[in-house]
Image (spheres, rainbow, N blue to C red):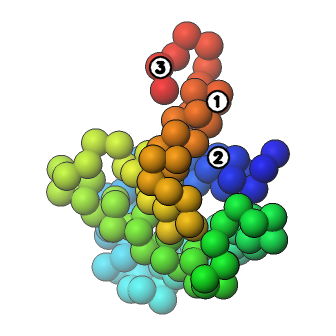
Amino acid sequence: ESAVTVFVRQTLALARVGDQYRLLLAVARTDLGHNGLHDLLGPMRESAAAVIRRGQREGVFSTYLPAEVLILNIEAIALSILEATNAGLLTDPTGAATTSSLVLLGIAPDEAERIVSGVRAADAPAGAHP
């Protein structure tokens, strides 16, 4: 699988979990503080950074920042999107987080939306509407 597809599947899965637990994550940010939540997300961050590094080597992700910095930005975007969802501003935080992440990685917004839609459709159970 391409680095883009792996990243999208990984991000969709994590965003779905984040969406299910977004209120708990909001409380955790307050109770644990930035460093506590940062530590809690460490294993996810390293896995995603490895995929980003692969994509950078393959030329599909931008190299304007190291993968370790990009993933910190992606994490901040995802948490902001969950907050926006809590405020009623978004109805599809999973798609928004994944598409925004791809844009941050250097993929044009329209192309990012198409990629996310394609992976969702490919992964949807038969007869389901992604």
Please identify the residue farthest to the bottom as the structure is shown: 35
Residue with the mark numbered 3: 129
Badge 3 local density, few (<14 within 10 Å), some, or many (20+)? few
Gap between marks 1 and 2, in whole Å?
9 Å
Residue type highlighted by circle 2: Arg
Badge 1 local density, few (<14 within 10 Å), some, or many (20+)? few
Gap between marks 3 and 1, in whole Å?
11 Å
Mark 1 or mark 2: whose residue is earlier in sequence: 2
Residue 123 shows which numbered tag? 1
Residue 103 spot, x, y in % from top left: 49, 61
Residue with the mark numbered 2: 9
Residue 39 spot, x, y in % from top left: 57, 82
Are circles 3 and 1 on residues that touch, CB within 8 Å? no
Indicate the secondary structure of the residue bearing disc 1: helix
Please identify the residue farthest to the top as the structure is shown: 127
**Left or right of 91: which side holds 20?**
right
Q: Is residue 45 above or below residue 16?
A: below
Indicate the secondary structure of the residue bearing disc 3: loop
Quadrant showing the N terminus: top right
Residue at figure coordinates x 45%, y 54% from the top left: 109
Are circles 1 and 2 on residues that touch, CB within 8 Å? yes
Residue type highlighted by circle 3: His
Residue type highlighted by circle 1: Asp
Residue 73 spot, x, y in % from top left: 49, 77
**Left or right of 64: which side holds 50?**
right
